[in-house]
Amino acid sequence: DAGVIQSPRHEVTEMGQEVTLRCKPISGHNSLFWYRQTMMRGLELLIYFNNNVPIDDSGMPEDRFSAKMPNASFSTLKIQPSEPRDSAVYFCASSTNRGYQPQHFGDGTRLSIL
Amino acid sequence: AQSVSQHNHHVILSEAASLELGCNYSYGGTVNLFWYVQYPGQHLQLLLKYFSGDPLVKGIKGFEAEFIKSKFSFNLRKPSVQWSDTAEYFCAVNEGGGSQGNLIFGKGTKLSVKP
């Protein structure tokens, strides 16, 4: 079975540029989550979707961040404009709608903003 | 609001030593509890989970965890660690009762096992 697929695996760009991270959840999973992981702050939930609808975006740091889920098999996390403090590993995870089912994580995108 | 506390930031053990990583959560209702492991440079993987039934849960690679409701705890244990257990371990909780919701993670505990 294909797991959660994220692209790109690594991204290095200059500050001010737009960055788009992509995620394909596991087929049949209704919930999708975007996390950010840094040494300082650990693992933070940015936003999650149920059935393509954003449910909680309180973790999105500021207006520079936006996320979309146009259909059940694709989501994007966009940063515009990017800043050096956005450098982190961004994980996407998916699960079924049942709370007792675990989330399955992608391999992450390591983002470096110069 | 829910929160998850992992008391140990970094644990260093020798091979064959026993392991216990603490996890406490703050939520009075029904909960689902998870332990995830993140090996160096990799993504998070599920070690074990509890949502009902026997409070002693067995997971992969010889790990187990015990849910003690009165103590709001879900500590992770392994009787004898190996060098390959070197990783970061995350405890996580969400509200029980059915729907998938916000999974709250602890800050993680780094485990270093000396060969």
Image: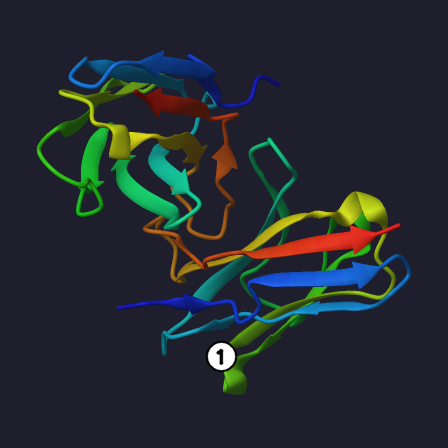
Which residue is drawn at the image coordinates 8% and 33% (left, top)? A63
Q: Please tell me whether residue B105 is drawn above or below residue B40 in the rendered image.
A: below
Which residue is painted at 42% across and 66% down in the image? B4
* SS under mark 1: loop
Please identify the residue farthest to the left as the structure is shown.
A63
Total residue callouts: 1
Residue at 48% in and 61% down: B32
Query: Is B82 located above or below residue A8 in the figure?
Result: below
Residue A80: where, in percent of width, then height?
14, 20
Q: Position of residue A16 (x, y in %)?
A: 15, 17
Give the residue at mark 1. Answer: B72
Residue B24 lies, in percent from the top left, at 49, 74
**Residue extending farthest front:** A114
Q: Residue furthest bottom?
A: B70
Check the picture and name the quadrant holding the N terminus of chain B: bottom left
Q: Which kind of residue does numbered mark 1 sit on?
A: Phe
Closer to the camera in the image, B93 or A109: A109
Q: Residues within 10 Å of mark 1 (few under 14, many from 20)?
A: some
Q: Is residue B57 visible?
A: no
**In the image shown, does B19 or A94 lie closer to the viewer?**
B19
Dot 1: chain letter:
B
- Is A93 left or right of B39, judged from the image as shown? left
Instruction: Please determine whether, in this image, residue B24 is positioned above or below residue A20.
Output: below
Q: Is residue B19 left or right of residue A88?
A: right
* Image coordinates for residue B48, horizontal then vertical, percent: 64, 53
Q: In this rendering, is residue A100 above or below B69?
A: above
